[in-house]
Image: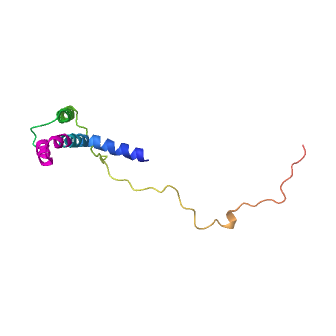
């Protein structure tokens, strides 16, 4: 179940393009750590986020995001539009599916008489 949830979250991130943000965050973190080793933390943050010192990973992320945008612009736009059947005539009244049973039972005279005892076969 946990694996299914992780797969679902990863799929949603990829479909929305958020994977580029995740990768860019990783690149910035690596840049800050590398720059902080040689200077102050404030200087490392300034160098990382000034936009004039991108790393190799930042270049690749930018190229990948741009190529994905180009693919999206070239792909045909698919939209689902609701469609309702057009009514050309008037609605017909509902017909009963069955007839209700007669509330009054038939009169006894309508019954057929049953012979008792049953008739016997005549020998041939």
Measuring from the top left, give residue 102's x and y in whole percent: 58, 64
Question: Residue 82 vs residue 42: left or right?
Answer: right
* Whether residue 79 is visible: no
Work out whether residue 81 or residue 49 is closer to the camera in this orientation and state it: 49
Q: How was this image coloured?
A: rainbow
Measuring from the top left, give residue 55's x and y in whole percent: 16, 35
| Magenta span contains residue 111 | no
What is the magenta range?
A: 33-49
Q: Does the magenta stretch mainly form a helix, a strand or a loop? A: helix
Measuring from the top left, give residue 23's x and y in whole percent: 24, 40
Residue drawn where x is 11% and y is 42% of the image: 47
Q: Decide: is 24 above or below 74.
A: below
Work out whether residue 84 or residue 95 is closer to the camera in this orientation and state it: 84
Residue 78, by quadrant, is: top left
Question: Residue 117 vs residue 51: left or right?
Answer: right
Residue sitting at the far front? 38
């Amino acid at each position: 179940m946990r694996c299914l949830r992780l797969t679902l979250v990863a799929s949603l991130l990829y479909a929305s393009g958020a994977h580029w943000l995740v990768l860019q965050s990783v690149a910035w973190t690596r840049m800050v750590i590398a720059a902080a080793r040689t200077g102050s933390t404030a200087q490392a943050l300034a160098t990382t986020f000034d936009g004039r010192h991108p790393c190799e990973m930042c270049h690749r992320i930018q190229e990948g995001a741009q190529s994905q945008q180009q693919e999206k612009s070239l792909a045909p736009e698919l939209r689902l539009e609701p469609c309702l059947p057009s009514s050309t005539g008037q609605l017909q009244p509902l017909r009963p599916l069955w007839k209700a049973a007669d509330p009054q039972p038939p009169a006894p005279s309508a019954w057929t008489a049953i012979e008792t005892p049953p008739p016997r076969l005549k020998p041939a």
